[in-house]
Image (spheres, grey):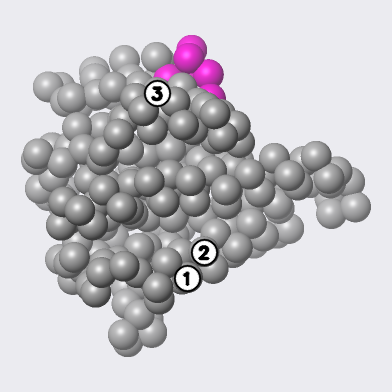
């Protein structure tokens, strides 16, 4: 198992009550980080925190419930968790819906989650990371081989990441997409596209990214 060595760090993973988000939260906890588990319902968050505490004995786990499409809810979330060292913007489902059946309301909700929700969190936490001189933000965009709103909006989320990367406030800061990307050599170092290896793939990607990226 790859050692992420995250002792003393606090990691916040959105959409981490299940699936890929939970796998990432688990690897962060195994690496020694204090983990903030997030979800939209209290029931799911409580169950995820209890499960994570059992699976990673001695880990520091807390849960936060918030709908990222609600600006007021995001504001309360930030008040409850004012500072983190690592932010993983993972929230957002990727249902396969025929293009002509997608309503404006559905598009709006997906875009508010994938893009605006992620931007609100990144805007707050990036400023804190720059102040403290260390931090990592990962936009874990939705990707798919078929048409889904998550896949399309994931590309827009990556465009947002690229904008922050180019216009970062401090030289050397790094923001990552859904793979570990070496921008200097224009190559993918590692991806975690295989569902059965989500946690391990994330650990390898994050470890390489952590080693080559410095504020």
Label 3 or label 1, whichever lies nearer to me, is 1
In this rendering, is residue 133 above or below 91? below
Q: Which stretch appears magenta?
A: 39-45
- Secondary structure, mark 2, is helix
- 3D distance between C-alphas at marks 3 and 1: 28 Å
Q: Is residue 57 visible?
A: yes
- Residue at 23%, 57% (x, y): give it: 130
Query: Could you give the CA–CA distance between mark 2 and mark 3, rounded to whole angstroms?
Result: 25 Å
Query: Which quadrant holds residue 17?
Result: top left
Q: Quadrant of residue 147?
A: bottom right
Q: Are marks 2 and 3 in contact (CB under 8 Å)?
A: no
Helix, strand or loop status at disc 3 = strand
* Residue 89 pos. (x, y %): 44, 47
Describe residue 134's horizontal placement relative to residue 138 as left or right: left
**Earlier along the polypeptide chain: callout 2 or callout 3?**
3
Residue at mark 2:
160
Residue 67 vertical placement versus 167 (above, below): above
Q: CA distance from mark 1 to mark 2?
A: 5 Å
- The part of the image, by quadrant, that contains residue 7 is top left
Question: Which residue, given by chain and number where applicable, does mark 1 sit on?
Answer: 163
Local crowd size for mark 2, using a 10 Å CA cut-off: few (<14), some (14–19), many (≥20): some
Image coordinates for residue 170, horizontal then vertical, percent: 25, 69
Label number found at residue 64: 3
Q: Are marks 1 and 2 in contact (CB under 8 Å)?
A: yes
Horizontal arrangement in the rendering, residue 78 relative to residue 155 (left or right): left
């Amino acid at each position: 198992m790859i050692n992420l060595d995250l002792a003393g760090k606090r990691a916040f993973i959105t959409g981490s009550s299940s699936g890929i988000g939970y796998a990432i939260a688990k690897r962060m906890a195994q690496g020694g980080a204090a983990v903030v588990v997030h979800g939209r319902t209290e029931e799911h968050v409580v169950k995820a925190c209890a499960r994570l505490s059992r699976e990673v004995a001695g880990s520091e786990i807390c849960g936060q419930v918030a709908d990222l499409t609600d600006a007021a809810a995001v504001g309360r979330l930030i008040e409850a968790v004012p500072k983190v060292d690592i932010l993983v913007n993972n929230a957002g489902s990727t249902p396969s819906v025929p293009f002509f059946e997608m309503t404006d309301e559905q598009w709006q909700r997906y875009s508010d989650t994938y893009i605006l929700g992620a931007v609100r969190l990144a805007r707050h936490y990036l400023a804190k990371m720059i102040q403290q001189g260390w931090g990592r933000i990962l936009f874990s965009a939705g990707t798919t081989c078929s048409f889904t709103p998550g896949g399309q909006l994931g590309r827009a989320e990556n465009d947002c990441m690229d904008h922050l990367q180019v216009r970062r406030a401090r030289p050397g800061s790094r923001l990552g997409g859904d793979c570990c990307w070496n921008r200097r050599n224009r190559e993918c170092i590692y991806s975690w596209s295989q569902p059965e290896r989500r946690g391990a793939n994330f650990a390898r990607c994050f470890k390489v990214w952590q080693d080559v990226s410095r504020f």
